Amino acid sequence: MSSADPVSKAPIISLHDVYLSLGAGHSRVDILRGIDLDIESGHSVGLVGPSGSGKSTLLMVMAGLEQADRGKVLVEGSDLSRMDEDTLAQFRGTRIGIIFQSFHLVPTMTALENTAIPLELAGRRDAFDVARAELEAVGLGHRVHHYPAELSGGEQQRVAIARALAPRPSILIADEPTGNLDSDTGQEISDLMFRLHKQRGMTLMLVTHDPRLADRCERVVRLKSGQLVETPHEEAYADALADAPADALSGE
């Protein structure tokens, strides 16, 4: 290869022949069946499919919160299966930000304290300074001392986003990030998430039932019965539309 040839970069997330089953004996269920998926650095990818198809489980495997029965999961070239629990937690805490549908905020902590959690766990002395700056970035600089019960659903999700982004991860994983929000608030959260994704050059991987949110991604893949179905963006959008619950379309 000449020096003028472009150098191909390894995917930031790479799954090879990943299988995962849950339960035991006759109740054991195959959740993921032979998943092969490469995600390029800086891209936004929407994962769609019917309820129970394994979408959230696949995200958790990528984040190292679930371990595959077999296959290989590489994140930034590191094999998650070869890490012990402490190493994996440290790796995840610095490289992967996670946003959940139900926010997962600690009710007895303020917005500032919730945002600072991953930084404090990493031993950062500037944890609260960084947390305050992240809350400013998501439009909550005036709510830093409020508790979750004093915040609206949209504000709680903004705190969750600030917490996920505080360690400056290279990967942002979002599991139905607008699922518990009304249509207008969900749109605001979507706008915020994609703006920060672009500004910071993060890879964004999200699960959604909302076809409008999926359509904002550069790439959409569909999971059906534990297997990925690669389709053109327009077809995947149509699949998301077909799989979406009625309330995802009505904004209720």
Image (cartoon, grey):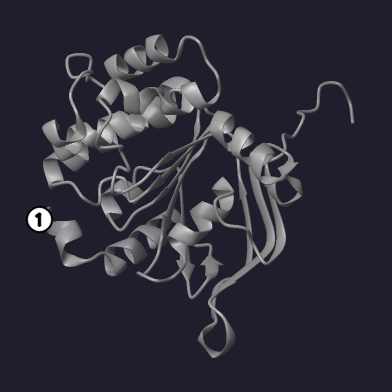
Check the image and report above or below for 184 versus 196: below
Q: Amino acid at mark 1?
A: Glu
Say if 189 sits above or below 235 in the image.
above
Q: Considering the numbered disc 1 on the image, is that residue within a helix, a strand or a loop?
A: loop
Mark count:
1
> Left or right of 172: which side holds 184?
left
Residue nearest the viewer, comparing 86 with 70: 86
Asked which quadrant contains residue 17, the reply is bottom right
Q: Is residue 31 left or right of residue 166?
A: right
The quarter of the picture where residue 66 lies is bottom right
Q: Position of residue 182 (x, y in %)?
A: 13, 47
Q: Position of residue 51 (x, y in %)?
A: 35, 69
Residue for point 25% across, 37% down:
107
Task: Please give the name of the residue rendered at 9% of the width and 55% of the height, measured from the top-left corner.
Answer: 252
Residue pushed farthest right? 1
In this view, 243 is above or below 233: below
Q: What residue is pinned by disc 1?
A: 252
Foreground pick, 146 / 11:
146
In percent of the image, x 20 and y 34: which residue is there?
148
What percent of the width, then of the height, locates residue 237?
35, 58
- Placement of 58 over or under 192, stated as above or below: below
- Residue 87 versus residue 77: which sits nearer the camera? 87
Q: Please rate how many residues cluster around mark 1, counting C-alpha atoms within 10 Å: few if below 14, some from 14 to 19, many from 20.
A: few
Q: Quadrant of the N terminus?
A: top right
Q: Do we see residue 51 in this rendering? A: yes
Q: Residue reaching furthest front?
A: 108
Q: Position of residue 102 (x, y in %)?
A: 28, 48
Which residue appears at 86% of the width and 21% of the height?
A: 3
Q: Is residue 167 visible?
A: no
